[in-house]
Structure formats: structure tokens, C-alpha cells
Amino acid sequence: MMDSKWFLLLLGALAIVSIGGQYISTEDKASWGNMAKYDIHRALKVQQNTRKAKNVILFVGDGMGLSTVTASRILEKGEKGFLAFEKLPHIGVLKTYSANKLVPDSMATATALFTGVKTNQRTGGVDATVQQNDCPRSLLPETRLESFFTWAQRAKMSTGFVTTTRVTHATPAALYAHTASRYWECEATMPPNATQCKDIARQLIEDMPGKNINVIMGGGRQMLQSNAVNRTKDFVDTWACYSRDGRQLINGWVSDKMTRNVSHQFLENSSDIEKMKITDYTLGIFANGHMNMEHERDKGHGGMPSLSYMTEAAIKLLEKRNTGYVLLVEGGLIDYGHHRGKAKKALGETISFSEAISKAMAMVNLEETLIIVTSDHGHPMVIAGYADRDQKITGIAGNSKIDGIPYTSLLYGIGGPNNYKYQIINETVFREDPERIDTDDFDYSQQAGVRTHEVPHDGTDVLVYAQGPMAHLFHTVHEQTYVAYVIAYAAQIGPYAHLADAVQNHANWKSVGNNTHLLAVFLLYLNWRQ
């Protein structure tokens, strides 16, 4: 039975909390106090789950810095609301620098997250002794890194990844590829002196651990087969390579699975997911290049699936075997929106990413599944000025006290040509008046102070949110490499596979008899101390 004081506290909390997790607008002194008491009550109830993680799902919001999370929350839920992952009970901070750069790129950060080792800019799956474009050194066994996908497969766990980018793009490629350049997605972009290196697409289909990944979903058809067929009415990706060597890697994937006599299926649109079977291996390629953003994708049966739908499908497929699984879900187009200086596109993709997390959390048992949500890096988008509470986050914050021209709440420190909104008239610099434009439009480009070719990344720390077995290990400021080791420790794989051996040894010793039981416990303790 709940005692009277907690019952009254709960009633007070219910009075200020709505069903959707947002606080009601009353903001008197008592409301703020009740809000704090409710949060304290929740905090006191948080317990450490020290079980082994049967499953691990890592969500990576590419380019989702803290200002992006804040602005997306306000856009979707209001100031007092929460995105799906913001109520996870354990939070830490990750440093994002790469081995040779203060501000990282996505392949270097993905390598840190997935292998536990920092590497050089634009390289993946290799250590920091490999410089960009150094094909010969990337082939040396001692430079090659194992990701937690390799660790999981070695432990007989299922593996899968879902992304809104190309399946050969920088972030997912770090799971399975060893490359001196993130740009070597297919042979067409590789220089003549790199012919002995395999492109990223071939490594996914032909090499370990790529060929053993149970679920692969995303875009990137034109990297996998020459003369890619435009079946989903999307465009040719001019930002990526277009395979010309005649290889049909999708057919190669099918042939490999047939040779191994394992059940498999190839999916091309939302309708295929609706009709999918529960097979050992699934390859879903839904676009020539990156998939379309949530606000512009074809939501019909023959169109592209949402990130939530792909995540749901991946979990259903990976649960087929009872050996546990490791799944990566990347909200990859948050980064795409920011690079082009269109903040609302990035916020829309963040909201879509949050919806995928909500879907996953509703499907899994959080007592045995470790959920981790983080970002690889942020972007120099700021929330500035002194906008009123009822003003849209995508709207006007106020007027400059210098030139009198309005400015928006969202701004970029540095941006592309469309973000640099200055002109010189009669030797006087004038800034564009954003009140004359629809700043809430997905295609509006926020103003930036410095002009370059696009909005770059920033070097600010990012947050990591977690729930489930060993989630409490995220508790302070960590290196980005820490994530791979938490996954390994929680699932007892890779560098912590000996923990699983110790537990099994304990069970074996215990079955012998009471005389050996204490010795087994002591040996288990020694293993855990390591």
C-alpha cells in the first residue's frame, strides 16, 4: 500500500502532468514545487539493473547536438514536454573529437562509438596509424579494428542496422568496413593507387562481419548495383558514387544466402515490409541514395518506409532467434538537414528519430534490453535572443538593437551560401529581414555569421541517454569510445566475453557439489575484478 504522503504527492503530480508527458500551463509557486517533488520521487525509484543484456539497441542521431534536441522538443512538445528518449533514467556526456581533429566527421565518430578506438578524420574501422587515402596501410591486420557487431556475431548473437542514409554511408560503414576513406563507397570514387582495397559496398556484401549481418535496411542502391533501377521514384544521388564496374552486389547478396542455404528476402518498399517473412537474413534497399526525409517521403504502400517502420520490422526479424541481438538505428538525415542550413528539416528528422525510439521501447522488454541513445556530433546551430514563450521556435526572436532588423530564434554560426544573407548597398552592409520570409518553411535557410560551402559540424560534447541492463554505467563525462565498452560489458561480448565464461563456469562448478561452490564463487569474483 502507498502511504498517505506519497499518495498526496502523486495526486499533486497528476495535477500538473498531462497524458502526453507535458506539464499543464499553470506555473504558480506550488506547481513548480510539485513538479520538483514529482521528479525527486521518480529519481528515488531508479534502480540499477545489473543483469546481462540479452539485447542491445544503439540509436545514433547523426548531427543531433544538444541545441537540436532542445529545439526539436519545443517544436514537437513545447518547452515543458519531452522527446521519447529524454525521460530515460541514465544520462552521460560524450567527448566527440577524433584522433587528429578537434571537430570530427561522422566516420571517425562512428568508429569510436562502435569499436572503442578513436581514429583519423574520414577513415573507418582502422586505427589512427592509417591516414586518409592510405590504402596499403589500411590492409595491414594490425591496423584493423573490430566493431561490436563482430563481437556479437562471435557470441552467436544476431546483428542488424537500420538507417535513413545509404547503407554504405559513413556511420553504418564503420560497423563492418575497414577503409582509408569514407568516400570509397563504390569503386567509381576510388583512386588508381587504391585498387588493392575493396570499396565499402563490396565489404558489406562479401566480407565479415558484413555478410553475416542479419538485417540491413536503408538507401544506397546505386552503390550496390550498376545501372540502379529507380523503383521508388527517388532521384539519383549526385553526392555519392554510382557503381560502374558491372557488379550486381544485391544479386551477390542473394547468391551468398542461397549458397549457405539460409532463409532470406530482399525488400524495396513499404509494401514489401508489410508482406515480409521472418527470415534469417533481410536486405532492404529503399532508395538510390539517401532515403527521403520524413516530411517529403511517399507514405503510400509503394513508397519508402519511415525510420519507425524499419525499426519495428528489424526488431521483429532479430527476435527470431533466442540468442539475443545487437541493433543499430541511425537517424542519419538530421545531419543532412543541418549541412544544408535548413534547421526545420533537421528538427523534423529528430522528431522522426524520437518516434522510432518510442516504437522500439514499446516493443522490447527493458529489463533485458539495453537502450542507448546518443549522437556522433553536433552542428553550430544556436537558440538565441529573447523570444516570448508563445513564439514558434522557428520564428522571430526579436529585433537587433544595432540595425533594427529582426532575427530568428534559430541561427547558424557558420553556413553555406544560402545562409549568408548579407549584401552591400552604397558601401553599407545590410542583412536580410526574415519577417519578409516564411521562416517556418522546411526550405528556409537560417542566417549565419560566416559563409562557407555548407554548415559544418561542431566540436561540442553530446549527451548519451540509457535504460536497461548496465545503463547506469553512463553517469559522467566520458570519451566517445566508452560506448562500445559499455555495450561489450552489458552483453558480455568482445573484451568482456570472459564474463559470460565465468558465469558458465560458476554454473558448472555449482553442479558438482557444495564443496566446490565457494571456490566457484571466488573464481567468478576474480573474473569480474578483471
Image: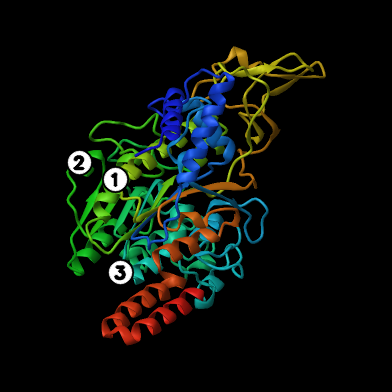
Circle number at residue 274: 2
Camera-nearest residue between 329 and 425: 329
Of labels 3 and 1, earlier in sequence is: 3
What's the CA distance linking mark 1 and mark 2?
17 Å
Of labels 1 and 2, earlier in sequence is: 2
The amino acid type of the residue labelled 2 equals Glu
What's the CA distance linking mark 3 and mark 1?
22 Å
Q: Is residue 170 above or below residue 52?
A: above
**Is residue 113 toward the left or the right of residue 96 in the image?**
left
Task: Find disc 1 in the rendering and name its residue.
Answer: 363
Task: Find disc 3 in the rendering and name its residue.
Answer: 156
The local secondary structure at tag 1 comes to: helix
Of labels 3 and 2, earlier in sequence is: 3
Q: Is residue 495 above or below residue 32?
A: below
Query: Which quarter of the figure has residue 158?
Result: bottom left
Q: Is residue 455 visible?
A: yes
